[in-house]
């Protein structure tokens, strides 16, 4: 597990241990988002910088990929089966970057407002974004064509998540709504009000045919992907929840609180196993 603080400091944990290893990086900056490219390499972006920082997590060595435009970056996601990442920025632009070549790539598309959330489909064919103005857009990455374009409200889109088959897009907004949208038709399949507060992050749990949701008021739930009904619900203690991350084995997930506390949870028990 790797975390990057807003001061640019990197810490990484072995999932079986409790003490992090701190890594000094050469060009620390306030970080808005990170994404793994390979096991030992991640990229970081900042709302104070228009470049993408490539970091070797074990050594702290870092290099910057310069940008073609002077737009600070807000989100980043790895594109599976490639050496590229995709970013969103404060002006609403969505762009590819080649980490192997250390070059900024083509513009995929743009929105009317700052990009607030992003996800890439399982096999790297589609990217979806949400904005601070409530716009939801999805593009075919290779063809750079729009597949979905919706603006249901002026609420902030806090999180977007593809279903494993990439046919449904789950969306959470600052109005407290969670929606499931069919990507081809653009129709809403179901919609529900979140529990306790806005849902700040979501993740797929294929073994339960569910999505995992986390709210800032520390409520964690499993929702049935077909109906939106609550399958499991639990609470965390301490500082507000900020993020959740599924482990590759699909049996565990990590909770990240705003004070930096990381907990490890079991999907089957739906409770913490370490903190």
Image (cartoon, rainbow, N blue to C red):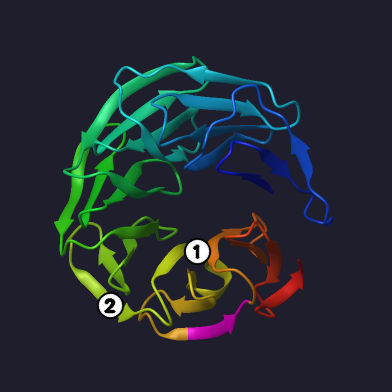
Above or below residue 209? Residue 165 is above
Does residue 144 show up?
no
> Where residue 43 sits in the image (x, y, percent)?
54, 32
Q: Tell me the residue at 76%/66% (across/down).
A: 275
Proximity of marks 1 and 2: CB atoms separated by less than 8 Å: no
Residue occupying image coordinates x 15% and y 58%: 151
Q: Circle 2 — which element? A: strand
Whether residue 234 appears in magenta in the rendering, the answer is yes
Q: What secondary structure characterizes most of the magenta part?
A: strand
Q: Earlier in the sequence, mark 1 or mark 2?
A: 2
Q: Is residue 120 magenta?
A: no
How crowded pointer 2 is (Cα within 10 Å; few <14, some 14-19, many 20+) is rated as some
- Using the rendered image of the protein, determine whether residue 2 is visible from the camera's viewpoint: yes
Q: Residue 42 — which label?
A: none
Residue 226 in which image quadrant:
bottom left
Viewed as shown, does residue 241 lie left or right of 90?
right
Question: What number is the disc on residue 191?
Answer: 2
Residue at position x 38%, y 26% in the image: 50
Q: Position of residue 106 (x, y in %)?
A: 30, 23
To which quarter of the image does residue 110 belong? top left
Q: Residue 256, how many percent across, how many down?
A: 61, 60
The residue where tag 1 is placed is: 204
- The answer to whether 156 appears left or right of 12 in the picture is left
Number of the front mark, 1 or 2: 2
Magenta region: 231-236
Q: In this view, does 58 lie to the left or right of 111?
A: right
Question: 272 left or right of 227?
Answer: right
Establish if 68 lies above or below 83.
Answer: above
């Amino acid at each position: 597990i790797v975390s990057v603080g807003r001061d640019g400091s990197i810490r990484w944990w072995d999932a079986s241990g409790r003490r992090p290893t701190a890594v000094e990086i050469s060009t620390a900056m306030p970080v808005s988002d990170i994404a793994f490219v390979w096991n030992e390499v991640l990229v970081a972006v900042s709302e104070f910088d228009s470049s993408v920082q490539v970091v070797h997590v074990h050594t702290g060595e870092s290099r910057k990929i310069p940008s073609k435009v002077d737009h600070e970056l807000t989100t980043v996601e790895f594109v599976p089966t490639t050496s590229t990442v995709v970013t969103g920025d404060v002006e609403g632009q969505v762009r590819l970057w080649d980490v192997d070549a250390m070059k900024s790539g083509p513009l995929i598309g743009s929105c009317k407002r700052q990009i607030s959330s992003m996800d890439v489909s399982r096999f790297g064919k589609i990217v979806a974004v949400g904005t601070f103005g409530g716009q939801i857009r999805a593009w075919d990455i290779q063809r750079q064509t729009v597949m979905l374009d919706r603006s249901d409200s002026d609420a902030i889109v806090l999180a977007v998540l593809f279903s494993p088959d990439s046919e449904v897009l789950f969306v959470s907004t600052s109005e407290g709504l969670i929606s499931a949208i069919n990507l081809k038709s653009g129709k809403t399949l179901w919609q529900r009000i979140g529990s306790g507060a806005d849902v700040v992050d979501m993740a797929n749990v294929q073994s339960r045919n569910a999505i995992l949701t986390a709210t800032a008021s520390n409520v964690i739930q499993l929702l049935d992907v077909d109906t939106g009904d609550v399958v499991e619900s639990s609470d965390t203690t301490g500082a507000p929840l900020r993020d959740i991350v599924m482990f590759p084995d699909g049996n565990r997930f990590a909770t990240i609180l705003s004070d930096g506390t990381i907990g490890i949870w079991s999907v089957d028990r739906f409770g913490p196993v370490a903190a």
